[in-house]
Image (cartoon, rainbow, N blue to C red):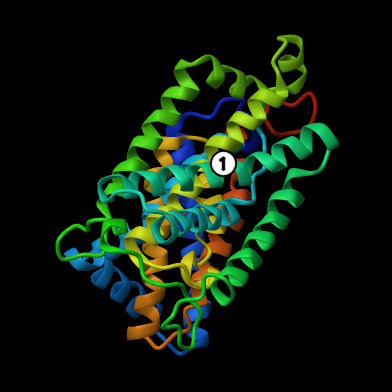
Amino acid sequence: MSWRLRLERSVTPSRTTVLLVSLLGVVAALVFAVPVFWAYKVSPWTAYTTIAQRSLGSWAGFMEVLRRAIPLMLCGVGLTLAFRARFWNIGAEGQLLAGAVAATGVALFTKIPAPWLLPAMFGAGFLAGALWGAVPAVLRLKLRVNEVISTLMLNYVMIYIVEWLVHGPWKGKTMRGFAYTDFFPAAAQLPLIPGSRVHWPTLVIAVGAALVVALVLSRTRLGYEIRVVGQSTDAARYAGIDFLKVMVAVMVLSGGLAGLAGVGEMAGVHYRLRSPTHISMGYGYTAIIVAWLARGSPLAALFTALLFGLIFAAGDIMKASLQLPAQIVGVFNGLILFFIIGSELLLYWRIKWERGWTGKPGSSGS
């Protein structure tokens, strides 16, 4: 008698399996990042303990993690919605910048009364991100343009729009060195949690957005249509679902939430429009990993955003305390994405041990 391994198909993995496999992917990424520290002659143990102590080990450090997580929450929640409909939105970066541009325009060039200025900025930011997101949806359904290409290319279009604005018509009167606009008036600046740089209104919006999106997916007709479209386009056609309506609605919400993230960064962190690399730091791209790790759950995206907020904060810690380049953050993000995608096999196939008899045909096996 002997034991043998057999792969068995698992159509619907349990939540526990999803959680364990996702954690396994993250841990594997951290292990495979060890040679990077060795290459810079830094002890991995020293690196990880320093990061933990200076980020999660203090109130100020945790607040910095939370600040970095806010735009990731908004973009990540929006992307989980798009991915559930199998619309591969790679354009959250551009949609975030669109929201930032709209918020800046309202803050600097309108005469809206002070009590209504911030709500107007958030409204304009949502609309700008929604419009920037709806364009690829229409292109896909009307002209069959691949959404991966269109959303990615629109990122670069918006990057160059921002560069043109800060170097041209919106250039600040006191600009020196890096390009930026004039500072926002006090009425256009978000309140912060005392002793931190966390703009709490945007955090509340992010948590509320996750709850609303979760309710939309589970309790509304639109959510049902999104789930059907994501599971089977043939079934969606049979059910008479309007693809254009669903895709535009998905991208309006997804892009709009990314636009709100741009407003939060403008009104809560920078208080002026700057070069794109200073505004976002790649939040829109990292949010793709946030949404993927969340496995389609808007509520889970809040927690995965915190993980990557920790990674962004760790980049500052490694640069200041360990004299390591901040680009290591990109290494972490890439490794986590690689192992999360690679771990998909473990979600839908499980290993099963079986007992079997060995021996020649006709023998008793004993």
Q: Where in the figure is residue 336, as x and y percent of width and height?
A: 53, 58
> In this view of the protein, which residue sits in the foreground, 122 or 41?
122
Specify whether 326 is left or right of 310.
right
Image spot of residue 79 (x, y percent): 55, 42
Which residue reaches farthest top? 239
Query: Which secondary structure lies at badge 1?
Result: helix
* Residue at position x 50%, y 48% in the image: 258
Left of 203 or right of it: where is 261? right
Q: Is residue 291 above or below residue 172?
A: above
Whether residue 127 is situated above or below residue 24 in the rendered picture: above
From this viewpoint, is residue 366 visible? no
Residue 319, quarter of picture: bottom left
Q: Quadrant of residue 176?
A: bottom left
Q: Residue at x 58, y 63 (%)?
A: 334
Q: Which residue is mark 1?
A: 130
Q: Is residue 303 visible?
A: yes
- Three-letter code, disc 1: Ala
Residue at 25%, 61% (x, y): give it.
63
